[in-house]
Image (cartoon, grey):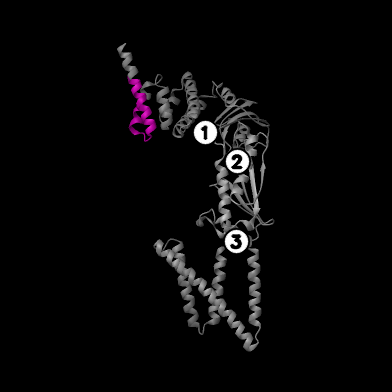
């Protein structure tokens, strides 16, 4: 049932009650007018047409809730007293029958919606109130679920079993993934026990796989507000144990043989397709040429498909740095541009290893462009991103010196990136020093 129908039903009950209890049509119109005025003010406030001081709004909201509850209780007490009086003095059982039918209908609807109420109560422990939409879940749902980005966990309520569960994917240390998987499950069970949560925990892990899925199930009746909070805290602690380094693996399946570098979350940063043809992939802008190989990147690392195995970082980069040729000038241009962006991202993160890897990619692409006299591509690299402008002015200065010097000067004058500006200043100073040495000779 949509929220608007709840409002309509409440309005109908109020109007019919007023009509029954009022002495004249005038009284009915006055009461209905007052209700309509309140509804109009609420609607204007919700749509932003009427603005009220936040503090005043909270006070008015509390007053309104108090009046609504008080009137509701008074109405129910009055109706029960009136029906009791009618039965005692006139023997009129019609009111009792009406109350009985209403109570039965209310009890049935309360029972049917119990899971929905329970689920909303769960959500209130870890979601902002403005994100919880009570009308988004049907009363007779068999499974409620939501993903919590703060803990990287999927929480669910299985109504058929009365089970509340939490699921999370954990990323394992590549030095010994099987041992780490077992230790991670033991650690998570200890986290829950330390918090007083009784849960059945299980892990799904394929031998040799870089990730595992952990599930914790508990009776929904035990998940009070405080228990839900500590249950979520356990998943947050579990997420903090994840391995955040690089993985190097080999896929050998129906799509050929692919060596790849990835991080947690199935994000593949570099990949080499060896069979049936040689192709290279660097981040998202320099993809494989064949559609079936690109499909491998799009679907992510799924250890259940094909054959996967971990390889060493040395083995991966030995194959990666065998590349001396590109498909064409545009291919080398794309690798130069993307590696430049990745280099300065690594500088910002303080990742020395990634800086070295990206620098090799930049210099390798630059050698190809210079060897193939790709002047137009070199000039264009000096006009797009600041990151590629820096590297182009640095590596192509002997080929197109006038463009390189002009690009360096423009970076110093107009760039908002202090890292690029300071490095470009050193580059200019170094160039002037070399020019001075040449003059002295």
Q: Height in image: 229 above or below 113?
A: above
Q: Residue at coordinates 56% horizontally, 73% vertically from top-left? A: 12
Residue visible at 47% across and 79% down in the picture: 30
How busy is the neighbourhood of tag 2: few (under 14 within 10 Å), some, or many (20 plus)?
Answer: many
* Above-or-below relation of 261 to 242: above
Foreground: 125 or 20? 125
Q: Overall secondary structure of the magenta stretch?
A: helix
Q: Mark 2 sits on what residue?
A: 170
State the separation of the CA atoms marked 3 and 1.
47 Å
Q: Is residue 382 left or right of residue 157?
A: left
Q: Nearer the viewer, residue 411 or 248?
A: 248
Labels 3 and 2 touching (C-beta < 8 A): no
Q: Position of residue 297 (x, y in %)?
A: 59, 35
Q: Can the viewer see residue 428?
A: yes
In this view, the mark in front (1 or 2): 2
Q: Earlier in the sequence, mark 3 or mark 1?
A: 3
Q: Which mark is residue 285?
A: 1
Q: Is residue 373 magenta?
A: no
In front: label 3 or label 2: 2
- Taking the image as shown, residue 145 lies to the left or right of residue 400, namely right
Q: CA distance from mark 3 to mark 2?
A: 31 Å
- Residue under label 3, please give it: 117
- Dots 3 and 1: beta carbons under 8 Å? no
Tell me which segment is drawn in magenta: 408-432
Say whether disc 3 or disc 2 marks the residue closer to the N-terminus: 3
Q: Quadrant of the C terminus?
A: top left
- Decide: few, some or many residues near mark 3? Use Cα within 10 Å; few <14, some 14-19, many ≥20: some
Where residue 108 appears, x then y in whole percent? 66, 68
Residue 431 belongs to magenta span: yes
Residue 250 in the image, given as x and y percentages of width and height: 63, 29
Q: Residue at x 43, y 66 (%)?
A: 59
Task: Give the quadrant of residue 433.
Answer: top left
């Amino acid at each position: 049932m949509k929220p608007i129908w709840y409002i309509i039903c409440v309005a109908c009950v109020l109007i019919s009650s007023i009509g029954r209890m009022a002495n004249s049509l005038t009284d009915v119109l006055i009461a209905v007018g007052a209700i309509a005025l309140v509804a109009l003010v609420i609607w204007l406030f919700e749509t932003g047409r009427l603005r009220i001081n936040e503090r005043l709004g909270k006070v008015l909201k509390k007053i309104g809730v108090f009046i609504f509850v008080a009137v509701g209780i008074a109405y129910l007490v009055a109706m029960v007293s009136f029906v009791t009086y009618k039965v005692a003095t006139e023997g009129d059982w019609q009111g009792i029958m009406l109350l009985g039918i209403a109570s039965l209908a209310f009890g049935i609807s309360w029972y049917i919606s119990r899971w929905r109420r329970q689920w909303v109560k769960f959500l209130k422990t870890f979601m902002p109130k403005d994100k919880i939409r009570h009308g988004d879940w049907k009363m007779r749902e068999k499974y409620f679920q939501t993903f919590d980005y703060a803990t990287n966990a999927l929480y669910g309520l299985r109504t058929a079993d009365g089970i509340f569960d939490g699921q999370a994917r954990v990323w394992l240390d590549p030095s010994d993934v099987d041992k780490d998987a077992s230790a991670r499950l033991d650690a998570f069970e200890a986290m829950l026990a330390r918090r007083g949560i009784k849960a059945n925990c299980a892990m799904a892990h394929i031998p040799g796989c870089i990730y595992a899925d952990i599930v914790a199930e508990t009776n929904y009746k035990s998940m009070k507000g405080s228990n839900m909070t500590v249950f979520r805290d356990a998943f947050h602690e579990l997420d903090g144990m994840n391995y955040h380094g690089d993985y190097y693996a080999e896929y050998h399946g129906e799509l050929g043989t692919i060596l790849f570098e990835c991080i947690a979350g199935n994000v593949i940063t570099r990949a080499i397709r060896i069979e049936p043809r040689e192709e290279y992939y660097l981040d998202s802008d320099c993809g494989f040429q064949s559609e079936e190989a690109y499909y491998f990147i799009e679907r992510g690392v799924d250890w259940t498909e094909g054959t996967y195995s971990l390889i060493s970082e040395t083995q991966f980069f030995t194959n990666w740095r065998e590349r001396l040729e590109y498909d064409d000038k545009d291919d080398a241009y794309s690798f130069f541009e993307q590696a430049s962006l990745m280099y300065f991202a690594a500088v910002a993160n303080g990742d020395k290893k990634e800086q070295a890897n990206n620098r090799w990619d930049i210099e390798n692409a630059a050698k190809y462009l210079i060897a193939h006299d790709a002047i137009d591509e070199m000039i264009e690299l000096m006009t797009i991103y600041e990151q590629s402008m820096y590297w182009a002015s640095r590596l192509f200065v002997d080929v197109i010196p006038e463009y390189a010097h002009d690009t360096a000067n423009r970076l110093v004058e107009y760039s908002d990136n202090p890292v690029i500006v300071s490095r470009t200043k050193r580059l200019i100073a170094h160039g002037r020093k070399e020019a001075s040495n040449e003059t002295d000779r």
